Structure formats: C-alpha cells, structure tokens
Image: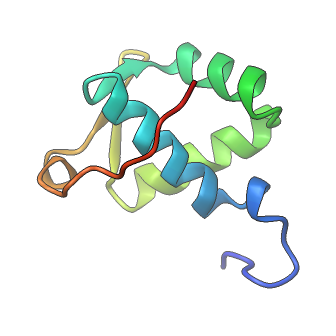
Amino acid sequence: MIPKVGTNPEINILTIGAKILVYLRQKNQCCILDDIFEYFQKNSNLSLDHIILSLDWLYTIKAINIENNQVFICKWLCCIKPLKVKFS
C-alpha cells in the first residue's frame, strides 16, 4: 500500500518515480543505475532508500527494466507523449 495522505510530495515514491521517468527520457530512455542515484542524491537531496523504493515501484508496475546496471524505460511506455519537464 502506498501512503497518499500526510506525506511530503517531494519524497513520495510516485513523485520520485515520475521524476525518474522524465530523467530517463532526457537520457534517451536509458542510463546507468549509478547515474540515477548520483543525480537525485545531489540535485534533490533524496535518500538512497527513497530512490531504491521508487525504482522498485517502477519495476513492479513494468515501467522500467533493469539489466546489467542499466535502467531502461519499458517499450510500452515509450509510446506515451513525454512530459514537458526539464532537469538542470
């Protein structure tokens, strides 16, 4: 069960998961797992636990695939129009 009430939206796994998908789109649908950890710890001040939980959730709903330390957006998700969000 994912808590929806009383949680800070910045550390909610749904919000973080959406940001990870946007980040992957900007990286041509794929990047190294370590790059995701480094980027979000540095730029969003997120704990490793929150990032891992968000990646687990994305994997569970088949939004991403992880293979040999590479994170890929699943093919069915690539057909959806990308969001207009930019990361610095």
Q: Tell me what residue is drawn at x 66 percent, y 79 percent.
A: 1
Instruction: Tell me, yes or no, if residue 66 can be seen here.
Output: no
Q: Tell me what residue is drawn at x 74 percent, y 45 percent.
A: 50
Q: Residue furthest bottom?
A: 5
Q: Is residue 33 above or below residue 47?
A: above
Q: Is residue 1 above or below residue 72?
A: below
Q: Quadrant of the C terminus?
A: top right
Q: Is residue 5 above or below residue 25?
A: below
Chosen colour scheme:
rainbow
Q: Tell me what residue is drawn at x 55 percent, y 15 percent.
A: 35
Q: Is residue 85 above or below residue 26?
A: below
* Left-right relation of 58 to 47: left
The quadrant where residue 62 appears: bottom left
Number of marks in picture = 0
The quadrant where residue 68 appears: top left
Instruction: Tell me, yes or no, if residue 26 can be seen here.
Output: yes
Residue 4 % position (x, y): 72, 81
Q: Residue furthest right?
A: 6
Q: Tell me what residue is drawn at x 67 percent, y 75 percent.
A: 2
Q: Nearer the viewer, residue 46 or 71?
A: 46
Residue 21 % position (x, y): 42, 44
